[in-house]
């Protein structure tokens, strides 16, 4: 049965406005989203947990008068808990785990009026830049089903790109918002460290490298959702500088003449795929045409030290999470419970010392200071999100036993984004380029710590200059 076939013509704020005016009901929108999920998900495998009855109950109980009242929404199957529903972290080790409480961010989504109707696929424990967990199988990129949608928010990005909904929850510890946004032709911003809460079970993710927000079709949806969810909760360990005004007010506001540093090369000095280089150079030219001052410049990064630090900090957190799960289950976690790469990460973590972890956190702070100095001369840093267009599924499969090839592919495909998780800077992927084969290639813009506002102003300017909203995959 058709419910609201014009659904795909609206972004999330547009749908909420229709609900407010009484032109459509939340039930109309939910049933349309469910119908689209049932039609498209067999090809995509983006939505792995369906909470249709829970969503209908939200509506029946009465929705809050928030900015997204009645808008269908999906949580990522990672960290975000909704009381009474399953969250698996993409892992057999958590299969069947039912939350007994909400995370703070879930509460804020519900208070904003969102109608949560399911959870999206994630790689095991969010550890990959693709979405191919053994537990649920691979999510397919709607632009080409043989290719990866990116990760770890690949299910979210595939669902939004396919038109199941206009915005979905995502998180980013090493590029996991920006990478799938790039691979699926969406807008995705990783906010400044601490801009959204991680509680109540954690104060921060991966020593402050991880943060949650969303992938969306429009810039204004992302800005408005950040307005609805930002701010430290009681007991949070820190908060970023307060925004001067709502982020939605920045959308369409004048940018001024920005000083933009552009760099194409990977941290090791090698060049990316020609399509990626073309995307960056075209974006730099567009910025010049918009009146910005663009120069070639890049911070000096030690890629080996960066990789070692990520392995140390993330590995320690993975090992701890598995220990805690073992305690909850009352038994040891074995290789049968997790994927090969996850097991390797956890076992390697056990060989490292506490001083190595402390050295890793010092390196994170060093990177923050290095980029802080670099950004004194530049307002924006422009570089690729990925070193290649979206790879084919299987290239980054975490069940591989060929670790050397896996790591080489990881370095080749996604060496850029993790730096800004280390520094905590706001960083966004903007869909400005498609390859000759029709695959999206996002362009990454990074701002000063705390200056999410400038990124939203620039993103809106780019959205107007080179619109992407109506560019859709043909499934």
Image (tube, rainbow, N blue to C red):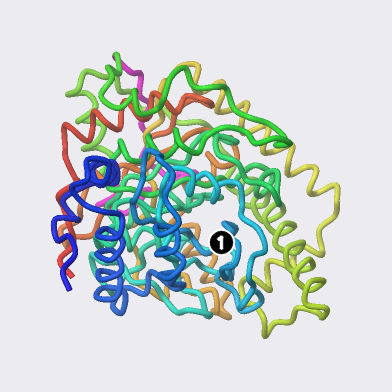
Q: Secondary structure at mark 1?
A: loop
- Residue range corresponding to the magenta coloring: 257-276
Q: Quadrant of residue 292?
A: top left
Badge 1: how crowded within 10 Å, few (<14), some, or many (20+)?
many
* Point 30% across, 27% down: residue: 251
- Please tell me whether residue 113 is drawn above or below residue 27 in the rendered image: above
* Residue identifier under label 1: 78
Q: What percent of the width, then of the height, locates residue 78?
A: 56, 61
* Point 81% across, 64% down: residue: 350
Q: Is residue 449 left or right of residue 343?
A: left
Closest to the observer, 9 or 408 = 9
* Point 25% across, 24% down: residue: 252
Q: What percent of the width, then of the height, locates residue 426?
A: 48, 34
Q: Quadrant of the C terminus?
A: bottom left
Residue at the far bottom in the pictured view: 336
| Residue 70 appears anywhere in the view | yes
Residue 40, magenta (yes or no): no
Residue at the far top in the pictured view: 256
Q: Quadrant of residue 3?
A: bottom left
Closest to the observer, 158 or 131 = 158
Q: What percent of the width, then of the height, locates residue 33?
A: 28, 64
| Residue 178 appears anywhere in the view | no
């Amino acid at each position: 049965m058709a419910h609201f076939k014009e659904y795909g013509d609206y972004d999330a704020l547009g749908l909420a406005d229709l609900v407010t005016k009484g032109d459509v009901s939340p039930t109309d929108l939910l049933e349309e989203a469910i119908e689209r999920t049932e039609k498209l998900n067999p090809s995509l495998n983006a939505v792995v947990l369906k909470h249709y009855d829970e969503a209908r109950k939200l509506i029946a109980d009465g929705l809050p008068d928030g900015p997204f009242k009645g808008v269908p929404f999906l949580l990522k199957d990672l960290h975000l808990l909704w009381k009474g529903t399953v969250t698996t972290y993409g892992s057999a080790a958590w299969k069947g785990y039912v939350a007994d409480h909400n995370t703070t961010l879930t509460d804020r989504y519900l208070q904003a009026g969102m109608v949560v109707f399911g959870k999206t696929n994630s790689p095991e424990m969010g550890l990959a830049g693709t979405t191919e967990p053994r537990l649920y199988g691979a999510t397919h990129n709607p632009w080409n089903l043989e290719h990866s949608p990116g990760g770890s928010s690949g299910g979210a990005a595939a669902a939004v790109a396919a038109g199941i909904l206009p915005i979905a929850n995502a998180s980013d510890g090493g590029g996991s918002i920006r990478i799938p946004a790039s691979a699926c032709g969406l807008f995705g911003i990783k906010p400044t460290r601490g801009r959204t809460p991680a509680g109540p079970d954690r104060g921060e993710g991966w020593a402050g490298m991880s943060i949650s927000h969303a992938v969306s079709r429009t810039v204004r949806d992302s800005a408005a959702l950040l307005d609805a969810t930002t701010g430290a909760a009681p007991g949070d360990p820190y908060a970023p500088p307060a925004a001067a005004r709502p982020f939605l007010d920045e959308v369409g506001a004048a940018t001024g003449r920005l000083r933009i540093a552009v760099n194409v090369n990977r941290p090791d000095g090698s060049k990316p795929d020609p399509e990626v280089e073309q995307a960056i150079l075209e974006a730099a030219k567009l910025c010049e045409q918009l009146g910005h001052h663009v120069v070639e410049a890049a911070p000096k990064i030690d890629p080996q030290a960066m990789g070692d630090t990520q392995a140390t900090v993330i590995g320690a957190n993975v090992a701890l999470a598995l220990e805690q799960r073992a305690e909850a289950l009352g038994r040891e976690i074995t290789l049968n419970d997790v994927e090969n790469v996850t097991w390797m990460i956890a076992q390697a973590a056990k060989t490292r010392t506490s001083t190595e972890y402390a050295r890793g956190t010092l390196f994170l702070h060093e990177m923050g200071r290095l980029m802080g100095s670099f950004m004194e001369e530049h307002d924006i840093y422009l570089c690729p999100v990925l070193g290649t267009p979206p790879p084919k599924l299987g290239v980054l499969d975490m069940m591989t036993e060929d670790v050397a090839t896996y790591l080489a592919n990881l370095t080749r495909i996604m060496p850029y984004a993790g730096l800004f998780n280390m520094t905590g800077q706001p960083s966004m992927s903007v869909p400005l380029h498609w390859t000759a084969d029709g695959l999206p290639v996002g362009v990454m813009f990074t701002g000063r710590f705390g200056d999410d506002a400038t990124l939203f102003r620039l993103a809106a300017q780019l959205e107007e200059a080179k619109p992407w909203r109506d560019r859709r995959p043909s499934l």
